[in-house]
Image (cartoon, rainbow, N blue to C red):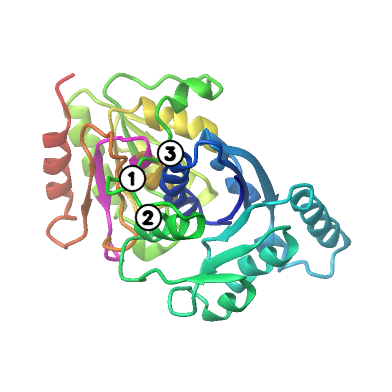
Amino acid sequence: MNVLLIKTSSLGDVIHMLPAVTDAAQALPELRVDWLVEAPFAAIPLWHPAVQRTVPIAMRRWKKQWTARQTWQEIGAARRALQTQRYDQVVDSQGLVKSALWCCLAQGPSAGYDRASAREPLSALFYDRTLHVSRQQHAIARNRQLMAQALGYSLPQTGPDYGLRGLSGRLPDPGIALPAGSVVGLHGTSRADKLWPTEHWNALAQALADQQRHLVLPWGSAEERQRAEDIARHARNVLVLPRLGLDALAVLIDQAQAVVGVDTGLLHLAAALGKPGLALYTATPPALTGAVSDRHAAAPLRNLSTAHELTAAAVIQALLATLPPL
């Protein structure tokens, strides 16, 4: 079965789709998946063994540059890439009008959320077949149910399997090795209200220094780099990484002993890799989009969201209780 999967963004949403691909691959051994995805996240689908090809798009950039010749050239190239393959099923799990429109450009019958299930109800007008999936459940569960209905197999009653076991061995060596017992601190996020205060990160860094452990800080913007360097000035054990791509970050997160992170896509990557640690939800409840660890994880990530759980002292205590001795 040849399937085109449409899940374009964002980083966490793309990762949340991986368990549905694992379910489908186990139910349909001859499954071949192509994946339409925003270019910055195009590395992620190819981490899954069942995904053969990605078709990168740039809708976020295109909508800012609709009149540019390059925009229409790139749209045409993406359309031609889709039409090189006839699909047995096209599945849109994004549930937006902009994602549903791509179903019209692909060759094959399409399926997606019905009006009551989709984030944008108008998207249901573009599918050949609409499917009902309750919105009052975690995004991973919604993706798994949609894929099972679209492809016609029974939904497994097991926890999510992201299909990423052994990923580090399949990716290029980033040329960086983390010190033993390192904790990765995912401090950057897209919204200010999702941040954990810098003074709390400083306290966490000092507590880890007392344990002879390193706090490793990645960054993806000038603001995040500045925050990481500010934290590094307050403790001798903080390692600020260079700016890295997703392949390198996946390898380094996998090297870490644990992860502490705010609500950001890399936190869901850590969960997919089965890393233990803490997920800090300072602004949004984790019930529908919280970190859900791979079912093979030895110790799942723990979601913290109440005020008393998110104090520096409470987070430090919870993390140190999670970490094994060096």
- Residue depicted at x 27% and y 60%: 286
Instruction: Tell me if 106 is positioned left or right of 306 in this view.
Output: right
Instruction: Determine whether label 2 and label 1 are within 8 Å by CB.
Output: yes
Q: Position of residue 213 (x, y in %)?
A: 24, 25
- The first of marks 2 and 1 along the sequence is 2
**Residue under numbered circle 1:** 160
Q: Kindly report the distance in space between the C-alpha atoms of the residues bearing marks 3 and 1.
A: 12 Å
**Can residue 210 be seen by looking at this rendering?**
yes
- The first of marks 2 and 3 along the sequence is 3
Instruction: Tell me where the magenta segment starts and ends, as one range.
Output: 271-285
- Residue depicted at x 38% and y 22%: 178
- The first of marks 3 and 1 along the sequence is 3
**Residue under numbered circle 2:** 140
Q: Which amino acid does label 1 sit on?
A: Pro
Q: Where is residue 208 in the image (x, y as percent from the top left)?
A: 21, 32
- Residue depicted at x 55% and y 56%: 7
Q: Kindly report the distance in space between the C-alpha atoms of the residues bearing marks 2 and 1.
A: 8 Å
Q: Which mark is residue 55?
A: none
Q: Residue 26 carries which label?
A: 3
Dominant secondary-structure state across the stretch colored magenta: loop
Q: What residue type is labelled 2?
A: Ile
- Residue depicted at x 40% and y 40%: 162
